[in-house]
Each structure stands twice: as structure tokens, then as C-alpha cells.
């Protein structure tokens, strides 16, 4: 490949903004090829932006970014090289799929690069062994601890032998032992792939020390470049950590000094935290195994341990978030009780993952929490301001958390945890990803809280220098506490030079198998590795299909892991079909009516009987006056009022044509119209009867007969008319809902980054997302049709094949429509609501299911025509009711196919393949 | 108590901020309560309007021409003429006409001779709403036309009674009046269910609920904050819709008190948002919630009395639907907005919605903490 002098990537005059915030200010830098390059600098200075631009996942705004010999602003170049770049985004495995197992996650990325099954297998085994993840190969990624997720994300990035590896704080939150192995792994890969360039951002200065070349950044600019020793020389410092601080501009260093931990003052009274044999089991996995700790008031208690050893679970049990399986724990001498509001007020808790409101600004988050923790109203503002200053958040006070770097978000979480001056702090890796200066300033605060105010601090960390500042620490591994005591005592007990060595020693001893694993890892790497197969043409059909399949397969796996969702998707429509078919009916009966009889004659009584005998009417208490008509109709007690005038009988017999008054409740127009028809019918019957009584013959009321033939539904039963429509409605609604969350969910969860970074086209991604749901749609179609035929006894009179083909096309169009919704909404809530309302209105109203299409007017007609519902309704009703086949219906099939194409095209156009 | 109210208030304000940051959702809500209402109300007719009819005229007489011309707007589109009975199948299969009338050979002659000939009316019975009422219209028109014809040619007999039909609250039986308000009810139902439930799921998916649960905030406070925030947005949207779209653009006469309607809507929203939150405790993720919500709002949309009258439902189902708050809200809305009913008439509906709401709220609260914390495992 290239030699050391060559540049693998270059930025020239690059400026980047997020809204008003300037992230990069006219940055020019060169990343030399074939080397390990480190990006260092405080939080939020633009390190991640540089990396995202080079990896091509972020859009270049101004300036020029070149990587692997081309301009990253050009889509064709990006598509060409993105298979040669591996990008691992910041955050604890945000790009992973939580329900997929460790193995399946890596496997998915392998498939994206169209690797053969055999190639994937040896690569995955190799990677998992090197990262000590193979024991967890079958565990869902969502159940891994933060550090393990980081390792897994790295495996995913490394599956395809990239030429350029871009790692954004890859070891944040990873324990020291794993971190050591992590870098060993990178070294081995680099040894294997000569010429691979690595660009890493890191907050660990001891790691940066080992890099071949460093770029120090501050405030959107590059402030120094060179090797670690060059930087140290430049700053005149002994360690890189000190050099880092020295290189920062004056104002950022103010107040920064070497931390001093004053001796602890002993407080009397109950222990702050006391846990006895605390145990937590998830299924048959014991996460926390008989943990016993006691922490005094005002103590700073450090919690160290390998990733996934149960630290977070222990902390959650202490906060009351998780009930322990066995054992007991108490805070301030009181047993933990999830309902105990008073204790909660005294505790500040910070969880590992970001758990603040991304829709509130930094300041709003602080204010909200201050108020929820009942900080006195007049103290809220000063306290918020104090926190903004203390944690260096003043400049971003009005920014949204999503726009902040990981380090800045951590600071915000810390600020929130201490804003109400709690008596106890439970902090789960609070300083992961935070730069050294900010970390020290945070510790200054912790020390002050502990020593001055007697606040008890229970903190977990992976930074050894932080552990050294604790009064006592405990080492945890595999759910158990290995050792507990003062840092120096632990170090001396192991006879180790540093606490870090002692820690690694403890861990390696505890995990006897480690050596064997190391050997296995070495062996795996020592093996003559199979030649990576020549990859197919990335634009070739076979490779494209493989990628679509990769997405479809992953989506299907996620679906299978979520049987409740499948159940909802299949059972929901069935329940609805049964309810609708049973419930929707236009066969109106039992219309409530009452009579106002002002005649009280024999004739008016006969007229009344004509009504009460009709099955369409249900007689209510007689009316007493004109005013009563109004009141009874108003109250909804009756829907029809019939007024018989005085002298009705006499006038009728004299041929004076008396007038019968009928009042309808017009609030439900359909019912009113129908009732009017019924009234007419009853009166006609009455008149025929009258004529028979009077003249002995049925009068010739009409000179001709009308013979009505109800076609397609001779019995005029609602079920025949309704079933085909309900089938259409359910398929449309459920298929749309199934995909409507697909993309926006990945955006909310972070895994959309894989689309940005992977060598796939938007269409491949969308098709892959769509296919499994078309499958679900067809299963649902089969079930619903079977119910309609066998349970309701509605025969398929026409071509079943035409119906099934139509259903397939409808499922395609509906799922594609769901994807369209998913690409333009910003939140999952909007996606759910949007797909419900957008689909529901035309489906129920404009499709011909409830109201005939030929009677639609205006916009309704336009919307109806532009929505697939109408066309499948024609097919469905045509096949079920009218006995039609392809010959008569094919045009509708063609229109549905057109909808599939149009919706997919729209989704492709709306979907972005880079971040802004 | 004061603290609780403060929490509920603050957390609710937070919900409103979330909404402000989601312009697509705001647009969707606006669409739901303006354009969607207007389009449905003006586009869909439950009464016979614009019905399409064709005539096969085998007689070709004066009388048959008179009959053809008798189908007039707005009830019918001008009658089309089909050349032969053989064309009926294809035309009706394609759904071009809802009615096809066949006037047989020598029809006029037979009428004049008093031989009572038979007209054949083909009705597309797949469109149930139109088929029933439309058939009545067509037969009425035919009888009137024939009676008129016969009475001109000879001494006619009119009916011995006169029927005077008046329709209260909606004199011309404009279905747009009915559709508009029912559509609002249906949209309130859908929106309240989704907004409140999804707001809870989002907190869980983003891990923010975990944060809330370690704070001195009770589940009841969290739930109430979501209810008032979602409720406020929806009530505002519904009010806007009633004054601007229904009264303004559609010109519907609102007989009753809008204040009373809003009061009832608030109670209804309390019940629906509680239901949304209760459902959210049964779903583990947003995709699950989306699917779980569909049957609830579709059933409430179709079977609460807004689409098909309550009377035509089987008894068992009608009783079951009494559990749904939307059934009571539908009758409440019809009574208040159309019939101008007051509190004295609609209190049973208000009471029913309150009771259902409280029960749902208790169920949601009972499940809330357990399911929220467990999801963190």
C-alpha cells in the first residue's frame, strides 16, 4: 500500500456548523497513511466531526475532505470507498442491534460486505476470541454491559479488513484489562494488514502515548501535531496528560491544579449504604452474587471491575430500580423501598447511558430536575447557573443534548445528579468519555462534597487514577467482590507497582481460564488465515441481492426475537375482523319512536299498532305534548316522533286527507334517512290495510311494479358487503404500521449510522427492511381469508389467484408507504400517529368500503384515487362478491404495482445517506 | 399536594416542549383536525347524493323518457343509457353504476292499459349504505312519476293521508354535519390513545423513565403530567376544529354549548389517555405499541355509534362497547352539539366516562412502576 509519507485522508479549510454552534473552524489537517493516529482534545472540540467527515457519514459543509484518494463530497467516490473504511461511532454500542446476539450482530456486518459463509465464520471466531466475547456469543447485544458493547462494536467495524479504520473513543467505558487486549488486537490486525491506517479519538492519555502520531484539537481548531514525545517536549511536561493540559489555552487551565484529597472526617450515625448478600439473577444467569458492602457517611467508595461484572446491576438495586433476588440492602439505615420518596430525594443517581431529555435544552434539563428534586424556587436559578459554570456548560446552555459530544453530555448528567445537593451520590461510570481537565474538575467537586458536606459517594470507574483518589475501592468480577480496601493496601497486597497492575493481576487470577483463552486467541491469529475471497463487484446483482438479504435477514431475526410483535400483527387483524364483521351492520332495526296521539280514536289506535308491529320500530312511552316531542328527541330517548292530529280518524274516513306529522332526529343522518323510508313503508301498509277494511280490495296505489334485485349480495346481508372491505382495511393498516417505525426507530436508537457507513444503496436498505413485513402481511392475508371463507361462509366466487396477487401488491404498496412515512417523520410517535391517521381516513371513507366511490366529491375523490385502498377494494369485492378474475380486474393490479414503485421511489428520495 | 401539583405541572410542560420539537407531529395534528375533517365531511355522503344510475330503455316511449329524466341532482347523477341488458353485467362489475333500471318493451302501453307491468331495478348491494336508502329513493321517484303520468291521462287518485316529515336539528339531513363531528370524535380517540401511550414508551426507550423513577416523583404524577399535556393539545385542536372548520368552513349549525362539549372532551381525554398509558405498560417497545393500539382505536372508531348506529349492533357487542369511553363520548357529542342537550341530559355519559377513566387510571398506575423498572433489566 502506501508508505508513511502518504496521506490517507486530508482536510483543507473545513468549517462545520450545527445550527448556530461552530464545530470546526477552518480546519486543515493531514492523516498520514499506514499509521496509528490519535485525536486528542477536550470534549466537544470537533474530534467526532472530523472523524465522521473522513468516514463519509457526515455531509461536508464547507472546505474539502479527501479520503483514500478522492473527494468525500462526491457520492460516487463515497460509494466506492466506503467498503474500505470502517467506522465505529461514539457511544456505547449505539449502532448495534440490541435483540440480536453478539454473533448475529457481527454476522450482519459480514453479510453487508457480501462475505461468504465460511469467510464470515473464521473472521467472527477470530474477532470474538480476541475480544473475549466468544463466551457471550449467544447473548443479545442489549444485555451486554457498556464496555462489552464497545468491544462488539469494534468487532463489527473490523469484520471486513478495512484500509482505514476510524474509531471514535472506542475504549470509553472499557475496563483496563479489556482495554489492554483491545489495543493488542488492533496491533495484531495491523501486523496482518500492513498499511492499514487507524484514526482514533481517545480520552485516555496513556493510550494516546502509544500512538505513532497525535493531533491535538481545541475549540474547532488543531492546536498541535506530532508524536507523543514531541508534544511533551513542546509543552515541557513529563506526561502526556500534563502536556495536554499545558497545551490548552490559558482560560481553560485556570483553576486546574493537581488534586489533593484531604483526609476523611469520620461521621457518626448509621451507615450510608449497607448491603448484605445482595443477589440478582436474570433467568439462570447470576449477575450479582452475594455482594456485601458497607459504606460510611462521607466516604468516597470506588467500584472497579471488568465489563459486565455486575457493577451497574448492584447500583440499580441500591437505587431501588431493580428488586434484588435475595439479600438485603439499606440506605441511611432504612431498608430500600421503591416507594420511599424521601430517601429518593437524598440520593443523586447517574446511569451509564444517557438518560436525560433530548427534547429539552441543557438549561431546561437542569431546571426541570432542580424543580423535581424540590430545590426551593428562589434557589433554582442560582443553582442552575452554578452548575453551568462548574461543569463548563455555560456555552452550550441553550443547546440540545443531541448536538453535544459524549463528554459534554456526561457533564450534563453529572450536573443533574448533584443539582439538588444530595446526601448520597450513586454514579455509574460518570467520567467515561470525559476529558482529563473536566474529569479533574469534577473530582474536585466530589472531594469537596465528601469532605465538606459529608456526602457519601459510591462511584464506579475505569480510570485507575480516579480509583486512587477513593477512600476505599472494591474490585468486582463475574458478580462477586474479589477484594475491598484502601487503594494502597490492595496494591501492596499484590506487591504490584501500580494499582493498574494489581487490578489486572486480581482479574487474571480470578479468571483462571484466561490463559487458555489467550492461547486460543494467539492460536487463532497464528493460523495461516484463509485468503479473503475476492469480493464480487460491489455493483453486481449478486452482491446487491446479498446485501438486501443481509438487511431482510436481520430484520427478520429482530422480528423473530420479538414474538409479541408478531402475535400482535397476526392476532390484531383477526380480532378486528371478527368484531367488525359481527358489529358493522346497516340492517337498522328497533328504531326508538313514540306517538303523540291527539285523536285517541279507533283509527289512530290502528295506525299506532301498524308501527308497533313493525320489527323496524320499537315503541317508547307515549308523548304528551308538542313540547314533549322536542324534549324527548333532544334527550336522545327517541329517534322518531309521530304526531296524529285531532279528528284524524274522522277526517280520514271522510276523505279530507289528514296530515300525519313525523319528526326525525337528524343528528345521525344515515339513521334518519333510513327511518324515513321505514315510516313510509309502514304508512303504505296501513293504507292498504285501511282500503281492504273499507272497500274490501287492495287499491291500485301504483300503475307498475318495481322488482328490486340486489346483485352480488342477494340476501342483502352486511357481512357479504363488509368482509372484503375489512380485509382491505386491516391489511393496509397493519402493513403500514409494521414498516412505519422501521427507519425513524433506527434514527432514534442510533443504528441508522450503519446505513451511512456501509457500502449499500438506499434501495437495498429499504427493500431489505420491507421484505419481512410483506411476508407477515401475506400470512395475515391467508389467515383473514380463511376466516372469511370458513367462519363467515362468504365464498370466493372469483379467482383466488387474482385476490392473492392483489394482496401481495397491496402488502408491497402499504409497507412501502410505511417506509415513506418513516423517512419524513422525526419521532416514532409521529410515525405511529401519522400512519394511523393518514391510512385510516381514506381507507374507511374514500375506498368504497363504507360509502360508494361513485358518490365521492371534491378532494375526497382525488385523495381516494391517489391511495391504494380503492384499487384493492375493487379486487377484493370483485373476487368475493362479483366472481371476477384477472381479465376484469388486471387494471387494478397494475395500479397497485405502480403504487409500490412510486412509494419506494419516494422513500429512496426522502431517505438521506449522510448526516447533515 | 402542592409539590405533587408542581411536579405534574413541570413534567407536563416538558411534554409540551417535546411536541414543539417535533414539527412533523404538529403538522399531522393540524391536518387531522382541519383538512382531514373537511375532506371527509364534504366528500362522503351517507344520504343519497350523486348516486350513479343507468337505464336500459327497451320501450323508447314518452313515459320511459320521462322516467329517465326524473333522476335529478343532487340525489342522482343524470341517468346514463345502456344500449342493452347484455351490458348490465360488465357495467356493474366495474362498479360504474350503483343502480341499473330496465324499462321493458311496451311499458307505456301496458301502464296505460292498466296491466301493471314490472320494472326491474338492479342494485349493487356491495355498497350497503347506498343500496338500502337509494333503492327507496328510486322506487319513490318511479311511483311518483307513474302516478303523475296516470293522473294526467285519467282521473288520478292521491293517497288518503298526507305525510309531513320534518327533520329536527339538521333540517336538510346534510350528512356533512354528521360526518364532521363524528370525524372529530374519531380523531380525538385515535390521537389521545397514541400520544399518551407513545409518550410513556419513549421515556422508557430513552432510559429517561429510569431517571424519573429514582427521583422523588410518583408514577401517578408522571401519568397525570402526560394526561394533562396530551389532553390540552387535543382539546385545543378539537376546539379549533369545531369553531374554524365545522362552524366556519362547513357552516354547520351547532345547537349546543361548546363549553359543555369541551368539558366532556376533557373527561373523555382523561379516560383515553389513561387507556393509552395502560396499553403502554403491556407493550415493550414502540413497534409493539403501534400494533397493539390499532385494534383499540379501530374498534372505537367503527363501533361507538359514529359509523354504524348502535341499534344495529348485536346486543352482546353493544353491551361490551359500553366499556369503551368513546361510545359514551359519541352519544354525548351528538346530544350536546346537534341536539343542544344540557348537563341534565348528558350527565349519565359524563358519569360513565369518569368511572371508566378512573378505573383505567388505576389499572395503569398499578402496572406502571413494575413494568417500567423491569424493562431496565
Image: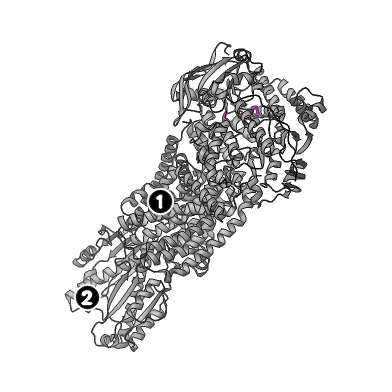
Classify mark 1: residues with Cα within 10 Å, few (<14), some (14-19) or many (20+): many
Chain of the residue that carries numbered disc 1 in the rendered image: B
For the residue pair A58 and A881, the one nearer the viewer reads as: A58
From where the camera sits, is residue A404 visible? Answer: yes
Whole-percent x and y of residue A838? 42, 49
Q: Which residues are magenta?
A: A112-119
Tell whether position A874 is magenta. no
Pick whichever, B178 or A510, lies toward us.
A510
| Image point (66%, 24%), residue name | A258
Single out the residue that lies furthest toward the left.
Answer: B153
Q: Residue at x 24, y 82 (%)?
A: A657
Residue A410 screen position, x and y as percent: 59, 34
First in sequence, mark 2 or 1: give its number: 1
Element on which disc 1 rests: helix
- Residue B32: which disc? 1
Q: Taking A4 as reference, is A50 above or below it?
A: below
Which of label 2 and label 1 is nearer to you? Answer: 1
Chosen colour scheme: one colour
Answer whether residue A785 is visible to the viewer in this image: no
Whole-percent x, y for residue A224 in the image: 55, 16
Q: CA gap, disc 2 to disc 1?
A: 60 Å
Judging by the rendered image, the residue that carries numbered circle 2 is B113
Q: Tell which of B107 and A621 is nearer to you.
A: A621
Q: Quadrant of residue A413?
A: top right
- Chain for numbered disc 2: B
Tally of marks: 2
Q: Which mark is residue A36?
A: none
> Quick one: quadrant of the N terminus of chain A?
top right
Amino acid at each position: 500500500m502506501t508508505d508513511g509519507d502518504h496521506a490517507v485522508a486530508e482536510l483543507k479549510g473545513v468549517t462545520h456548523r450545527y445550527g448556530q454552534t461552530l464545530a470546526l473552524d477552518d480546519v486543515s489537517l493531514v492523516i498520514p497513511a499506514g499509521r496509528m493516529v490519535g485525536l486528542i482534545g477536550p470534549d466537544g472540540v470537533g474530534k467526532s466531526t472530523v472523524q465522521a467527515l473522513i468516514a463519509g457519514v457526515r455531509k461536508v459543509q464547507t472546505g474539502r475532505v479527501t479520503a483514500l484518494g478522492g473527494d468525500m463530497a462526491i457520492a460516487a467516490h463515497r460509494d466506492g470507498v466506503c467498503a474500505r473504511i470502517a467506522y465505529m461511532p461514539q457511544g456505547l454500542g449505539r449502532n448495534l442491534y440490541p435483540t440480536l446476539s453478539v454473533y448475529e450482530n457481527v454476522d450482519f456486518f459480514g453479510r453487508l460486505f457480501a462475505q461468504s459463509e465460511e469467510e464470515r465464520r473464521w473472521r467472527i471466531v477470530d474477532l470474538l476470541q480476541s475480544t473475549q466475547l466468544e463466551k457471550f456469543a449467544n447473548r443479545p447485544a442489549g444485555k451486554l454491559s457498556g464496555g462489552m458493547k464497545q468491544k462488539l462494536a469494534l468487532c463489527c467495524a473490523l469484520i471486513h479488513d478495512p484500509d482505514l479504520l476510524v474509531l471514535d473513543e472506542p475504549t470509553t467505558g472499557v475496563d483496563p484489562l479489556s482495554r489492554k487486549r483491545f489495543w493488542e488486537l488492533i496491533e495484531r490486525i495491523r501486523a496482518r494488514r500492513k498499511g492499514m491506517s487507524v484514526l482514533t479519538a481517545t480520552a485516555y492519555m496513556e493510550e494516546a502515548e502509544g500512538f505513532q502520531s497525535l493531533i491535538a484539537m481545541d475549540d474547532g481548531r488543531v492546536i498541535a501535531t506530532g508524536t507523543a514525545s514531541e508534544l511533551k517536549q513542546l509543552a515541557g511536561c513529563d506526561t502526556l496528560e500534563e502536556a495536554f493540559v499545558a497545551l490548552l489555552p490559558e482560560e481553560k487551565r485556570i483553576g486546574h491544579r493537581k488534586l489533593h484529597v484531604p483526609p476523611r472526617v469520620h461521621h457518626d450515625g448509621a451507615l450510608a449504604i449497607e448491603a448484605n448478600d445482595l443477589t440478582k439473577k436474570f433467568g439462570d444467569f447470576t449477575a450479582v452474587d452475594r455482594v456485601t458492602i458497607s459504606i460510611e457517611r462521607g466516604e468516597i467508595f470506588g467500584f472497579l471491575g471488568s465489563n459486565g461484572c455486575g457493577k451497574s446491576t448492584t447500583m440499580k438495586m441500591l437505587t431501588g430500580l431493580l428488586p434484588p433476588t435475595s439479600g438485603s440492602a439499606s440506605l441511611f439505615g432504612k431498608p430500600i423501598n421503591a416507594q420511599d420518596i424521601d430517601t429518593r430525594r437524598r440520593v443523586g443517581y447517574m446511569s451509564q447511558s444517557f438518560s436525560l431529555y433530548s427534547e429539552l435544552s441543557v438549561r431546561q434539563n437542569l431546571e426541570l430536575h432542580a424543580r423535581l428534586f424540590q430545590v426551593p424556587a428562589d434557589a433554582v436559578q442560582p443553582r442552575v447557573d452554578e452548575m453551568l459554570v462548574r461543569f463548563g456548560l455555560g456555552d452550550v446552555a441553550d443547546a440540545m443534548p443531541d448536538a453535544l459530544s459524549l463528554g459534554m453530555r456526561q457533564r450534563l448528567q453529572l450536573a443533574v445528579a448533584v443539582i439538588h445537593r444530595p446526601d448520597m451520590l450513586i454514579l455509574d461510570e460518570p467520567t467515561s468519555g470525559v476529558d482529563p481537565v473536566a474529569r479533574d474538575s469534577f473530582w474536585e467537586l466530589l472531594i469537596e462534597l465528601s469532605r465538606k458536606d459529608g456526602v457519601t459517594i459510591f462511584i464506579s470507574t475505569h480510570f485507575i487514577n480516579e480509583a486512587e483518589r477513593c477512600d476505599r475501592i472494591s474490585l468486582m468480577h463475574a458478580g462477586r467482590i474479589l477484594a475491598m480496601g484502601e487503594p494502597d493496601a490492595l496494591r501492596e497486597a499484590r506487591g504490584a507497582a501500580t494499582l493498574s497492575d494489581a487490578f489486572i493481576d486480581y482479574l487474571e487470577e480470578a479468571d483462571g481460564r484466561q490463559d487458555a483463552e489467550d492461547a486460543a486467541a494467539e492460536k487463532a491469529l497464528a493460523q495461516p488465515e484463509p485468503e479473503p475471497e475476492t469480493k464480487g463487484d460491489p455493483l453486481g446483482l449478486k452482491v446487491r441481492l446479498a446485501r438486501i438479504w443481509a438487511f431482510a435477514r436481520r430484520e427478520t431475526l429482530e422480528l423473530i426475537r420479538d414474538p409479541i410483535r408478531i402475535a400482535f400483527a397476526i392476532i390484531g387483524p383477526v380480532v378486528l375482523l371478527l368484531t367488525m364483521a359481527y358489529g358493522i351492520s346497516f340492517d337498522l332495526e328497533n328504531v326508538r319512536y313514540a306517538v303523540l296521539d291527539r285523536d285517541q280514536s279507533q283509527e289512530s289506535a290502528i295506525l299506532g299498532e301498524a308501527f308497533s308491529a313493525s320489527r323496524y320500530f320499537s315503541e317508547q312511552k307515549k308523548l304528551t305534548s308538542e313540547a314533549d316531542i322536542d324534549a324527548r328527541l333532544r334527550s336522545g330517548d327517541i329517534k322518531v316522533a309521530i304526531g296524529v292530529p285531532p279528528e284524524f280518524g274522522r277526517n280520514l274516513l271522510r276523505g279530507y286527507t289528514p296530515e300525519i306529522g313525523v319528526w326525525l332526529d337528524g343528528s345521525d343522518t344515515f339513521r334518519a334517512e333510513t327511518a324515513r323510508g321505514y315510516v313510509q313503508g309502514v304508512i303504505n301498509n296501513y293504507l292498504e290495510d285501511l282500503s281492504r277494511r273499507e272497500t274490501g280490495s287492495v287499491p291500485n296505489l301504483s300503475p307498475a311494479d318495481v322488482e328490486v334485485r340486489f346483485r352480488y349480495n342477494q340476501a342483502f346481508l352486511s357481512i357479504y358487503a363488509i368482509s372484503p372491505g375489512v380485509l382491505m382495511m386491516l391489511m393496509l393498516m397493519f402493513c403500514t404500521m409494521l414498516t412505519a417505525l422501521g427507519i425513524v426507530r433506527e434514527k432514534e436508537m442510533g443504528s441508522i449510522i450503519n446505513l451511512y457507513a456501509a457500502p449499500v444503496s438506499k434501495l437495498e436498505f429499504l427493500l431489505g427492511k420491507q421484505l419481512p413485513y410483506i411476508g407477515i402481511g401475506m400470512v395475515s392475508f391467508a389467515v383473514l381469508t380463511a376466516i372469511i371463507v370458513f367462519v363467515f361462509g362468504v365464498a370466493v366466487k372469483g379467482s383466488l389467484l387474482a385476490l392473492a396477487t392483489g394482496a401481495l401488491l397491496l402488502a408491497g404498496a402499504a409497507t412501502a408507504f410505511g417506509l415513506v412515512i418513516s423517512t419524513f417523520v422525526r419521532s416514532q410517535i409521529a410515525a405511529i400517529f401519522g400512519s394511523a391517521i393518514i391510512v385510516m381516513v381514506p381507507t374507511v371513507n374514500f375506498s368504497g368500503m363504507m360509502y360508494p366511490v361513485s358518490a365521492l366529491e371534491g378532494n375526497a375523490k382525488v385523495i381516494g384515487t391517489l391511495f391504494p385502498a380503492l384499487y384493492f377494494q375493487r379486487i377484493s369485492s370483485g373476487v368475493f362478491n362479483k366472481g371476477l378474475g384477472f381479465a376484469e380486474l388486471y387494471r387494478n393490479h397494475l395500479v397497485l404495482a405502480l403504487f409500490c414503485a412510486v412509494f419506494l421511489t419516494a422513500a429512496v428520495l426522502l431517505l438521506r445517506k449522510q448526516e447533515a | 399536594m402542592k409539590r405533587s401539583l408542581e411536579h405534574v405541572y413541570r413534567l407536563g410542560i416538558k411534554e409540551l416542549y417535546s411536541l414543539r420539537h417535533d414539527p412533523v407531529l404538529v403538522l399531522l395534528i393540524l391536518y387531522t383536525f382541519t383538512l382531514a375533517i373537511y375532506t371527509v365531511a364534504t366528500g362522503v355522503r351517507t344520504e343519497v347524493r350523486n348516486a350513479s344510475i343507468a337505464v336500459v330503455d327497451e320501450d323508447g316511449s314518452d313515459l320511459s323518457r320521462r322516467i329517465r329524466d326524473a333522476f335529478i341532482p343532487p340525489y342522482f347523477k343524470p341517468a346514463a343509457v345502456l344500449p342493452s341488458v347484455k351490458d348490465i353485467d360488465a357495467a356493474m362489475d366495474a362498479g360504474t353504476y350503483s343502480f341499473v333500471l330496465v324499462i321493458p318493451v311496451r311499458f307505456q302501453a301496458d301502464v296505460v292499459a292498466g296491466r301493471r307491468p314490472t320494472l326491474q331495478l338492479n342494485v349493487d348491494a356491495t355498497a350497503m349504505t347506498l343500496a338500502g336508502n337509494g333503492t327507496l329513493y328510486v322506487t319513490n321517484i318511479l311511483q311518483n312519476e307513474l302516478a303523475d303520468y296516470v293522473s294526467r291521462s285519467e282521473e288520478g287518485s292521491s293517497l288518503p293521508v298526507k305525510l309531513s316529515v320534518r327533520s329536527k336539528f339538521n333540517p336538510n339531513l346534510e350528512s356533512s354535519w354528521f360526518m364532521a363531528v363524528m370525524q372529530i370524535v374519531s380523531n380525538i380517540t385515535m390521537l389521545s390513545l397514541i400520544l399518551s401511550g407513545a409518550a410513556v414508551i419513549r421515556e422508557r426507550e430513552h432510559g429517561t423513565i429510569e431517571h424519573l423513577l429514582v427521583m422523588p416523583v410518583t408514577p401517578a404524577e408522571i401519568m397525570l403530567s402526560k394526561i394533562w399535556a396530551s389532553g390540552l393539545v387535543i382539546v385545543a385542536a378539537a376546539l379549533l376544529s369545531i369553531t374554524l372548520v365545522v362552524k366556519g368552513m362547513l357552516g354547520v349549525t351547532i345547537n349546543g354549548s361548546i363549553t359543555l362539549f369541551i368539558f366532556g372532551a376533557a373527561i373523555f381525554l382523561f379516560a383515553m389517555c389513561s387507556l393509552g398509558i395502560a396499553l403502554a405498560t403491556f407493550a415493550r417497545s414502540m413497534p409493539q405499541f403501534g400494533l397493539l393500539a390499532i385494534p383499540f382505536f379501530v374498534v372505537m372508531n367503527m363501533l361507538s355509534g359514529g359509523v354504524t348506529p348502535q341499534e344495529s349492533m348485536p346486543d352482546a357487542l353493544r353491551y361490551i362497547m359500553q366499556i369503551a369511553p368513546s361510545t359514551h363520548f359519541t352519544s354525548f357529542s351528538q346530544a350536546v352539539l346537534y341536539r343542544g342537550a344540557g348537563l341534565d341530559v348528558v350527565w349519565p355519559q359524563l358519569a360513565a366516562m369518569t368511572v371508566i377513566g378512573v378505573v383505567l387510571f388505576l389499572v395503569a398506575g398499578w402496572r406502571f412502576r413494575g413494568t417500567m423498572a423491569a424493562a431496565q433489566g
